[in-house]
Amino acid sequence: MTTQLSVNLNKIALVRNARGRNFPAITEFGEMALSGGAIGLTIHPRPDQRHATYQDIADLKAVVRRFDGKELNVEGYPDDTLVAHVLAEKPDQFTLVPDDPNQITSDHGWDLHQHGERLKPLIAQCQSAGIRTSLFVDPDLEQVRRAADTGTDRIELYTEAYAEAFALNNYEPLLEQYMQCADLALSLGMTVNAGHDLDLDNLGNFVARGNVAEVSIGHALTVEALQLGFAETIKRYVNILQRGR
Ligand code: PXP
């Protein structure tokens, strides 16, 4: 299968929030991402709304609905506030992540031995509201089996360990572990997403096997966009100043 890209807009939201007005507008960047071929947009509102806000869910839902077949994925810890917003706005996908409010970013998957039973009713509730569910999990076969027991539609494999190993050029055994998890998930009837620290260098090898349906990428994609556009932007500023107006 061809892996689809969901663009995580949290970092654009972070820059927006730095100035307290709607610039840059994440809806505009969302439109660019979808026009450029991304299947969808992702945001991860945290309780302090330090980057994506709850209002962004409704605003981005309106954006994706203007494009045929495009999707909104909301990810985050399923506390009462986020769950209420998700059930009200009905994104296409809700990715449940076990991060606590003070974490800088997600840094582990669910322990489904401990939390699987608790998540089951919420998963069923989302599904009956027409929202696909995904559980963020480490590349661990036991967690994948337990994910299937919850009834979730998908899992999202947490790829930071792969990205780290890739940077050290020693990723093949670990990649195999991820691929076994993906194959097991597929055999248990779930679809496989992946995300965290994927970038232009490490992405190709991760999706080569063809068992990952969707990747969600934000941090590196935003940095790479700056790197690819920075020199040209400097040139344009300098040109204006040299023209003297
Ligand atoms: N998946 C989950 C569950 C995340 O929390 C994040 C970061 O918000 C991502 C994917 C995307 O990671 P990155 O920003 O490193 O691309």
Image: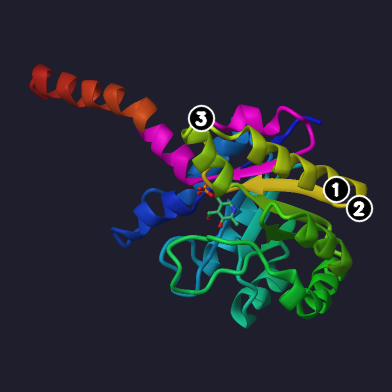
Q: Which residue in the protein does label 3 denote?
A: 169
Q: CA distance from mark 2 to mark 1?
A: 6 Å
Frontmost residue, 71 versus 199:
199
Q: Which residue is drawn at the image coordinates 81% and 78% (left, top)? A: 117
Which of marks 3 and 1 precedes in the sequence?
A: 3
Frontmost residue, 62 versus 108:
108
Dot 3 falls on a residue whose secondary structure is loop
In the displayed structure, does residue 212 sit left or right of residue 58?
right
Magenta-colored span: 201-226
Callout 2 touching callout 1 (CB < 8 Å): yes
Q: Which residue is drawn at the image coordinates 71% and 43% (left, top)? A: 177
Q: Which residue is drawn at the image coordinates 74% and 70% (left, top)? A: 112
Which quarter of the image is occupied by the N terminus?
Answer: top right
Frontmost residue, 43 versus 205:
205
**Residue 223, how many percent across, how many down?**
39, 38
Q: Is residue 51 visible?
A: yes
Q: Which residue in the protein does label 1 denote?
A: 184
Q: Amino acid at mark 2?
A: Leu
Q: Amino acid at mark 3?
A: Asn
For mark 2, does the 10 Å Cα neighbourhood hold few (<14), some (14 to 19), or many (20 or more) residues? some
**Residue 63, how many percent across, how many down?**
62, 49
For mark 1, does the 10 Å Cα neighbourhood hold few (<14), some (14 to 19), or many (20 or more) residues? some
- In the image, is residue 221 part of the stretch drawn in magenta? yes
